[in-house]
Image: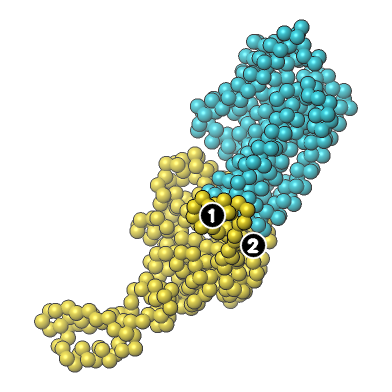
Chain colours: A yellow, B cyan
Amino acid sequence: MAAVVEVEALTKVFRVPEREAGLRASLRGLVNRTWREVRAVDAISFSIEAGEVVGFLGPNGAGKTTTLKMLSGLLFPTSGEGRVLGHIPSKRERDYLRRMTLVMGNRNQLQWDLPALDSFELNRAIYRLPRADFARTRDELIDLLDVGDLVRKPVRNLSLGERMKVEVVGSLLHLPQVLFLDEPTIGLDVTMQKRIRNFIAEYNARYGATVLLTSHYMADVEALCKRVIVIHHGKILFDGQLSTLGDRFGAYKTIEAVLADGERISLRVPRAETSQATAKLLAEHEVHDLTVEDPPIEDVIEQVFAS
Amino acid sequence: MSARALPQQESWLRSMFDFYATTMRTQIQTQFQYRAATYMYTLGMVAEPTIYLVVWRTIANSHGGSVGGIDAGQFAAYYIVWTLVRTMNVVFTPFGWEERIREGQLSAQLLRPLHPVHYDLGWFAGHKIPWLVMYLPIAIGLSLIFHPTIDPRPLEVLVFLVAIWGAYVIRSLNHFVLGMVTIWTTRASAIFQVWFLSELLLSGRLVPLTLMPHWAQAVSSWLPFKWTFYFPIETLVGNMSTASLIGGLGMQLLWTGVGALLVTGTWRLSVRHYSAVGN
């Protein structure tokens, strides 16, 4: 399958002013400003094939959003190259912008005072969509996210979660082939998170869209992504199947056992010693039930960042 | 809907017309959401010219009926038309760019396959429609009080109708270029203040340009300000020759071209520099 997203040694360096606190430092800064270079993204390379849903993971400040902004044409890379759907995003060609979307959990592109339907109408005009196509897509997306009642209320009267759902509809009216989703479930309750997740999965299945998703909620990643890319300090630490992340970085396993007298025990043992510890437990105790589990994915990710 | 098919596009011209019409419609709807604010804003817009008018009428009356050849009736005509021209001249302020960047609105616009200047032009064109409707009774009221001297020819009315939109486009483009300074330096207010002070003095906004010193009048002819205030007002209240009317429209066309070139050039550089801070 052809790669839809191709990233080669992509780098972004920000030059930021820096000074100590206090009036004296402030005065000194007037005549002699000091700058510091921050390598937000440091020569990362990866590719994503058509229809893949990839989780882009990392702690705050790891370079996830900067990468998404470069791939969506918002930021010019300092060096290296990104190519999406055959376009160089930084050229910001109209044909490219019509084929992708960047959804940021904290961004508001809807008209605050009007029902979302009016904002959708504006998007129709901006993306030059024929009315019939637009109406069909809009109704389909509204149906998928079950927001029929919400799109008729002024946006200012919607809750955060409701607003996010209609934001997502607005971002997809032009049926983008590539979705960059930056924490699309941030600040939402569990039910709303699940609804958004299901919607992304359904959109991916229905339209064969390629998705690159960042999220701090591992439930999002586990539900949607077979593959994850882990980034930290601007560098890629891991790129592979989510299922193998635990094998590589999960330092321990958890053995849970129910003994004959009903006592429950839970042991956390180094991964390499799992079979030895299990054998010893079975030899020394009468065990009624026994499970050996990988650590929760959150712990594995924490381990990746710490490594 | 097929899985990967891109939606069909309409022709460029038709879709641009559709975009402007939709944006204006959306903005009119927004205006209707805040009726009280619209009333207050309109009253505020009337306050400034009324103060100028009262001051100049008083001065004219104390100088035997006219100042610099302009009598009380002509001052009344100037400032009543001024109000309409000023309303047409309201565009997205450069001061708004800081919020536009900080709140992530510019990022949202950059993700769309359309230059943001079109959005500003469409948005503020729509903004004017409710104001223009409210201006008409105000203009009638001011006319009954101040008795303006105004007798335009049909050609002057026609040129005026074109010139007020020309003024709007020129000022929009200029302010867009000015606002982009914010992408380069976050505190650009001082630069904006210099610009607005120059505009106030050299556009005919504060006083009719004929009352300014000759050197100021000469300077104003080489700057865009005059063509966004004084020229549209004079087309209706002055006695301009046909050649001057057409020449004025030509100058507006020239400044529109200059503005468009500046927007295009500085936009390319600014987008490269944009750091997408904020949301």
Q: Is residue B192 left or right of residue B223?
A: left
Amino acid marked by disc 2: Phe
The correct choice, above or below, for B187 with respect to A233 in the image is above
Which residue is at the far front? A24
Are labels 2 and 1 assigned to the same chain? yes
- In the rendered image, residue A42, in percent from the top left (x then y), is placed at 57, 71
Which residue is at the far left? A261
Q: Name the residue under label 1.
A: A25
Q: Is residue B7 left or right of residue A280?
A: right
The correct choice, above or below, for B106 with respect to B205 in the image is below
Residue at 77 percent of width and 36 percent of height = B224
Q: In this view, does B263 lie to the left or right of A233?
A: right
- In the rendered image, residue B145, in percent from the top left (x then y), is placed at 64, 10
Specify the subunit that label 2 lies on.
A
Residue at 46 percent of width and 43 percent of height = A155
Instruction: Provide the secondary structure element on which disc 2 rests.
Output: loop
Q: Earlier in the sequence, mark 2 or mark 1?
A: 1
Residue at 82 percent of width and 33 percent of height = B219
Q: Which of A74 and B125 is in front in this view?
A: A74
Q: Quadrant of residue A88?
A: bottom right
The correct choice, above or below, for A251 with respect to B74 in the image is below
Question: Mark number for residue A76?
Answer: 2
* Of labels 2 and 1, the one closer to you: 1
Q: In which quarter of the image is residue A177?
A: bottom right
